[in-house]
Image (cartoon, rainbow, N blue to C red):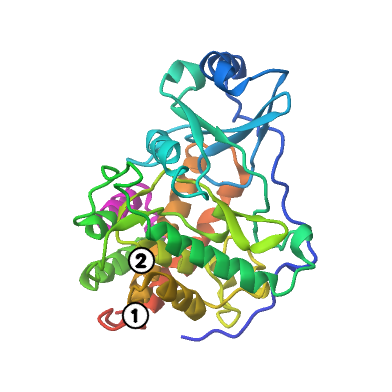
Amino acid sequence: MSRPPQPPLVDPFQDDAPPELAAVRSGEDLDWSRVEAWLRDRLGASLALEGDFEVMQFPNGAANLTYQLRFGDLELVLRRPPFGTLAPGAHDMKREYKVLSRLWRHFDRAPRAFALCDDAEVAGADFFVMERRRGEVVRGVIPASMRHLEAVGQRIGAALVRAMGEFHGLDPAACGLADLGRPGGFVERQVAGWKKRWDLVADPKHDAAMSAVHDRLVRAMPAPQRVSFVHNDLKLDNCMFAPDDPDRVIAFFDWDMTTLGDPLVDLGTLLGYWPDRADGALERQSHPGMEAMGLPDRAEVSSIYAEATGLDVSQSGWYEAFALWKTATVVQQLHHRWLVGDSSDPRMETIAARVPALAATAAERLDAIRGGGPSS
């Protein structure tokens, strides 16, 4: 079903981008004296942790807690899970540390991880510390430092897709990560696992629509073409660009779900977040304004990816539908955490308003592919 185009809610070439750093949100402080002591003991010699210790928070993420730590002029990044009850298998800091402590030697978009702490007495949960990269993150607004560049939206979009293709071309064994996952049956386990996550937090108002999409995903599941790394959360605001070079991605972030499996899952995730101006489906976007940036459209994203990898993308609609359905589950999880008092982030009060549009768009993507079957 087509929708009439809608005007952007923000002007991506005029409005201000959200700040990358802020004071730590109320309720999200850690025991910083213990954290500082642990870091000075563990990394003080190798990284020369000198000078005063200071903490700020990266406030734009929705799940894991991410902080900037300063020791004098040295900046580091600390990552730990959110507070409260966590979905099974989610927010795996050990996994993220394992990936980033090895992958940086083979893929320069992976920040280097320095240390993992699995002693909950220090910060209440596992955490790890990694290098701080500097650049621009694009969240619905073109950063001021990049607005003078020609065709900037087209270039950052194409750069991200090509970098994703390069990532999918890596040999996990050569990176010391052949044991990262079980690629056999990967997609089947993903679909089943995310249905269990939905069932744990399901809103009865949306359960019928979400369950119907799940049933169709199972019936129309494509066969994988090859095994590769799968980041599992690749999107525009999970990467960083050089301000003077929009053709270059300098970092990917949020590696805690990285595994081995079908690389088209990452393409589907990217497409699920990606706008087309003709959609008019702004209610499902987390960053309105993206549709007016001049990004390549979804068909072009798939074409660039196919050229970079040699993979058949004719069933990309299934992977996009899966990503949209999975995102609906994620936003419901985030809202549930707010409902039960595990999150103090005010954005989570209304985030689940996106669930109906995400489920409906997933059904539309399945309608459009061979084998998806019509919605009932």
* Residue on which the image places disc 2: 264
Would residue 237 appear left or right of 317 to someone viewing this image?
right
Q: Which residue is mark 1?
A: 314
Left of 126 or right of it: where is 134? right
- Residue flagged by tag 2: what amino acid is it? Leu
Q: CA distance from mark 2 to mark 1?
A: 11 Å
Circles 2 and 1, Cβ within 8 Å, touching? The answer is: no
- The residue lying at 69 percent from left, 77 percent from top is 7
Q: On residue 33, which mark appears?
A: none
Q: Closest to the observer: 202 or 185? A: 185
Q: Nearer the viewer, residue 209 or 20?
A: 20
- Res 277 visible: yes
**Horizontal and vertical percent for residue 229?**
35, 54
Question: Looking at numbered disc 1 in the image, what kind of residue is underneath it?
Answer: Ser
| Residue for point 24% across, 69% down | 221
Above or below 323: residue 203: above
Q: Which residues are magenta?
A: 191-205
284 left or right of 326 in image: right
Q: Quadrant of residue 275?
A: bottom right
Q: Main secondary structure of the magenta part?
A: helix
